[in-house]
Image (tube, helix red, strand yellow):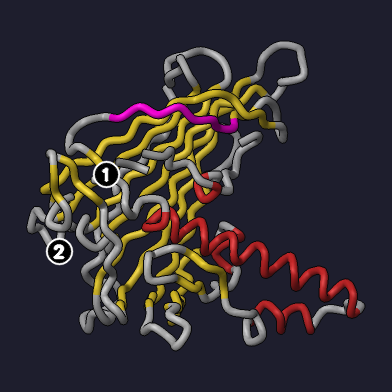
Amino acid sequence: MAPFLRPWLVVAVLSAGASGCAALGGARGGGLVTLTYAWPEPATMQVEHTVDVRTDWSDRTTAERRFTMTLGPVDEAGQRRLSFHDVEILEARVPIFVEPLATGIIDAQGDFQGIDPLEDNPALAFLDAMPLSPRKRAQMAKGLAVGLERAIRDTWNQWVGSWHGSRYKPGKQEVLPATMQVGTGRKERKEVPSEERQRLDVGVPCSAAEPEPRCARLRAVREPVGQSDKTPGTYARVELELVMDPTTLLPYSSRVIRMDRVDWNGQGGEPDFHESVHVEQYTFVHGPAPTAGPMARALPRQPMPTSLK
């Protein structure tokens, strides 16, 4: 098993300072469940993406968008394109929601292989409209490509890439050594030893619209060693909950929660602690867009913790 906190989980927290082990339906032996990548090709799903940020020093920040996501079919090189269409921005108080979405490249094993060139990406047209020298434009275009590729890679790993081939004993918690970043001031962070607790539960409903208990829920929580939300002082916690079909790794919902308690006077003086909670969630409806309205069968949002206390 491997820790889940890949770079995709270092989410853009709007705060100051802010693999599992599985054979179900697919491969079962010795009471273990193996999570298997087997998306249909092509695959189409409707996705709702929300972000909700609460802090004790500013107003609540929310964002919401919906889009159609497709994978495949396979091309002559054996690759599949993960592409995004019909993006509808319902609320965009988080900057990442107005950034374009790049087309990812996925191989037969479910591993991310990069993105398509950005030649036709709307972001490049934005650069063309700016008074930039050719050198500066090239630098900004390269930085944009790096950022878009990181975003797609991290999201794909959150859904699939970090988990395929992993093996779990259902209902058993595994504890793994890891590291994580904890805020030490308004802008500063440091890497600290942590532990990650992972658990897979099987036979859970996939969604409210598909209540048949054929899905699995993977939960992974990371905290600094020896700390909890009741421990005084600086603190951080990251939690992932992924509901998917373990025989294909098709996701039905994915939620990441990051909680931070940061001392804004981290360089000395009387401690001044502030807290933030950042929730990012995706819900998936498989198949073409429903005819009764956009995302008519989408899952209701899950409740969000509002405090570390």
The dot on residue 71 is none
Question: Looking at this view, is 111 or 276 the one in front?
Answer: 111
> Up-down: is 293 above or below 90?
below
Of the numbered discs 2 and 1, the one sitting upstream in the chain is 1
Q: Which residue is mark 2?
A: 209
Q: Secondary structure at mark 1?
A: strand
Residue 76: quadrant of the picture: bottom left
Mark 1 is on which residue type?
Arg
Residue position for label 1? 167
Seen from this angle, which residue lies furthest front? Answer: 29
Task: Characterize the magenta stretch by its predominant secondary structure.
Answer: strand
What residue is rendered at 47% in x and 38% in y? Answer: 258
Residue span colored magenta: 174-181
Give amino acid for label 2. Ala
Q: Nearer the viewer, residue 245 or 80?
A: 80
- x then y, percent, for residue 275: 54, 29
